[in-house]
């Protein structure tokens, strides 16, 4: 009996190690985009990933054919949303602007954009995961995309652009 449990535990550990070897890089990149940290300095993203992988490992035997990547991604997104809610009183723009490529976006915009565009999660699934109407997810994703494609100019940049336009 004891050997069977040890064998099961070893197989479970090997399966999970193989999963982590294949998925951890992509999940870390998604977490780094969510936290808007620099890729080489991302302690919050690494913590999110560690907690999500730990939760996935704890429920590994209960997956029953479910995609472990999908489960880990859902947990990562939920942890990010809860953390942003507690840290900032909601999924709104924090006082201090993050430095990553998605730093110009609010946490909610980052979450939806990463799920929709980077991870390829359908609007309906994203809406269900976040408890939002599909139309709201579509609107937020469109706004976030527009912000990234056409970033708002800062007052200093606008003044510099006007000065260049006036100079003969």
Image (cartoon, rainbow, N blue to C red):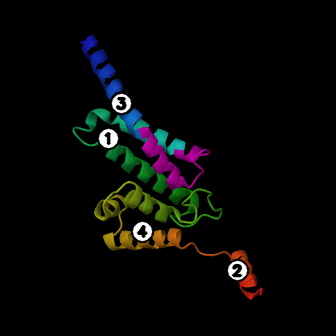
Q: Secondary structure at mark 3?
A: helix
The verdict on residue 73 being magenta is: no
The residue wearing badge 4 is 141
Give percent across and percent down for residue 124: 29, 64
Label 4 crowd (10 A; few <14 / some 14-19 / many >=20):
many
Give percent across and percent down for residue 6: 31, 16
Q: Earlier in the sequence, mark 3 or mark 4?
A: 3
Cα gap from disc 4 to disc 1, whole angstroms: 26 Å
163 above or below 98? Answer: below
The residue wearing badge 3 is 18
Cα gap from disc 1 to disc 2, whole angstroms: 50 Å
In front: mark 4 or mark 1? 4
Label 1 crowd (10 A; few <14 / some 14-19 / many >=20):
many
Give percent across and percent down for residue 83: 51, 53
Q: Secondary structure at mark 1?
A: helix
98 above or below 8? Answer: below
In front: mark 2 or mark 3? 2
Q: Which residues are magenta?
A: 24-45
Which residue does the image show at 37% across and 50% down from the upper left? 74
Cα gap from disc 3 to disc 4, whole angstroms: 33 Å
The residue wearing badge 2 is 161
Cα gap from disc 2 to disc 3, whole angstroms: 53 Å
Which residue does the image show at 28% across and 21% down from the upper left? 8
Label count reads: 4
Q: Earlier in the sequence, mark 2 or mark 3?
A: 3
Quarter of the figure with the N terminus: top left
Q: Nearer the viewer, residue 59 or 24?
A: 24
Q: Nearer the viewer, residue 14 or 91?
A: 14
The residue wearing badge 1 is 68
Give percent across and percent down for residue 152: 59, 75
- Relative to 140, is 68 on the left or the right? left
Cα gap from disc 2 to disc 4, whole angstroms: 29 Å
């Amino acid at each position: 009996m004891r050997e069977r449990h040890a064998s099961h535990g070893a197989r479970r550990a090997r399966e999970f190690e193989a999963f982590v070897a294949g998925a951890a890089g992509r999940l870390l990149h998604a977490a780094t985009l969510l936290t808007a940290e620099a890729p080489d300095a991302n302690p919050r993203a690494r913590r999110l990933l560690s907690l999500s992988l730990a939760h996935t490992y704890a429920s590994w035997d209960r997956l029953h054919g479910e995609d472990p990547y999908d489960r880990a991604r859902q947990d990562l997104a939920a942890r990010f949303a809860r953390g942003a809610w507690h840290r900032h009183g909601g999924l709104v723009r924090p006082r201090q602007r993050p430095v990553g490529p998605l730093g110009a976006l609010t946490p909610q915009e980052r979450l939806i954009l990463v799920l929709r565009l980077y991870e390829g999660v359908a609007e309906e699934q994203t809406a269900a995961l976040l408890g939002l109407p599909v139309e709201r997810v579509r609107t937020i994703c469109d706004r976030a995309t527009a912000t990234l494609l056409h970033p708002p100019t800062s007052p200093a940049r606008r003044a510099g652009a006007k000065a260049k336009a006036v100079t003969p």
